[in-house]
Amino acid sequence: MDNFSIQKLSKLFQDYLYDQGMVMEWAIFLNVIVNFIIILIVVLFIAAIAKRIIVKTFLTFSNKTKSTFDDYLVTSNFPRYIAQLFPLALVWYLIPLIFNESPIIANAFQVIAKGYLIVLGVYIFRSVLRSTRKFLEGTEKYHDKPIESYIQVLMMFAWGVAIFWIVQLLTGFSIISLTTLGAASAVILLIFKDTILGFVASIQVSVNDIVRIGDWITFSKFGADGTVTEINLATVRVQNFDNTFTTIPTYSLIADSFQNWRGMQESGGRRIKRSLYIKQSSIRFLAPDEIERLKEIHLLKPYLEHRQKDIDNYNSRNEIDKKVLINGRNQTNLGVFRHYINAVLNENSAINKDLYLMVRHLAPTEKGLPLEIYCFSKDKRWVNYEHIQADIFDHLLAAIKYFDLEVFELPTGKDLQKMVEA
């Protein structure tokens, strides 16, 4: 059917009313209403058919392919948006033909159609971006990258362009004039300051690999201590270990200091660094009978025999008078206990022997002499790590009395009561 035939059909009702004696202006007005209703019915009918055909075809195609990208396109309504292009194209074609005698109405409908096309284009673009994000998040290379940030930036750009076009469509002002762009830039910089900072921060976070989704971070300033679950343009979402959520501004990741535990998670173990505070007055030399008693501890027997043999040889070679215990070389209960701890850690299968393992003294404090255990557990999971650490210190606290040592502890009310009673 050619254009002339369509125009002729669109005037049938108008000619009929005019032949019946109606004023031409009213005949044209009523004809416009009838044509609008007819176009609306036809467009809705074609839209329903196009939607059904395209969605079904696309779904069938996606089920036959191995790629998941087309599946994500289906879930993001990409076929539904594409189906709307066909009735929109029909409207675009029919408007100037049917409303040729009503240029104002024709122009109004064309503006509406163009505006709808711009918005529809943004929605199609958004569905593609969402599908791309889901597809990339499912890959090994990009699953921990802040893809959401870039998606949001592209969507902001798309909506900005769409709004400019719609404004130009409604007002007729050119969006490329220098004055307009300058004013728009100033407004954008003022309104979207935090967003721009977030965008720059997202790029730096991604390029420098500062934080990934799944990292455990500690950010004391914001009270965050947990796993990063989302990184977008404006915020970073952290699920804390008490299952609460903390939201951190993205630009704070490069403006402030925080702790990322990824290095620990990727290493061979999780560090145990804790001290026993030894009461210094309980530290003393060991008499020979005490050394013999400690040899009954199987982890210490080889060390004590070898060590005591070296000490006895040294003392006899230098003719040391051992009537006084302090003379010459001697073993102390703290030194033997330190070697016992080292033996316990080396016997523990949960400790990684390939990483640092040591028992050392720290500087004495008013609370006693810190005897620090420094090692790494093989299991880095929080609960298991705490169990391993607790098992070690449970054993050491129970074993310390066998070496006639005391752990420093501030006096309690009961201690003061006993002292007063005494």
Image: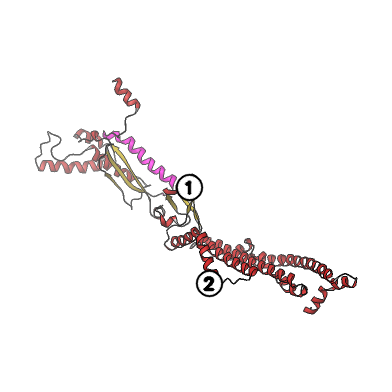
The amino acid at mark 1 is Asn
Q: Position of residue 221 (x, y in %)?
A: 42, 48
Task: Residue 345: name its quadrant.
Answer: top left
Q: Can you identify the residue that label 2 sits on?
A: 178
Picture quarter with the N terminus = bottom right
Task: Report the coloring of the rendering.
Answer: secondary structure
Q: Which mark is residue 224?
A: none
Which range of residues does the magenta coloring cover? 378-405
Q: Is residue 42 magenta?
A: no
Q: Position of residue 245 (x, y in %)?
A: 50, 48
Residue extending farthest top: 421
Task: Residue 23: name its quadrant.
Answer: bottom right
Q: Nearer the viewer, residue 44 or 374?
A: 44
Q: Position of residue 420 (x, y in %)?
A: 30, 21
- Left or right of 68, for residue 53: right
> Visible in this render: residue 198?
yes
Q: Nearer the viewer, residue 178 or 249?
A: 178
Q: Is residue 379 magenta?
A: yes
The amino acid at mark 2 is Leu
Q: Can you identify the residue that label 1 sits on?
A: 240
What crowding class fits label 2: few (fewer than 14 Cα within 10 Å), some (14-19), or many (20 or more)? few
| Depicted 334 relative to depicted 32: above or below | above
User: Is tag 1's residue or tag 2's residue first in the polypeptide sequence?
Assistant: 2
Task: Residue 311: name its quadrant.
Answer: top left
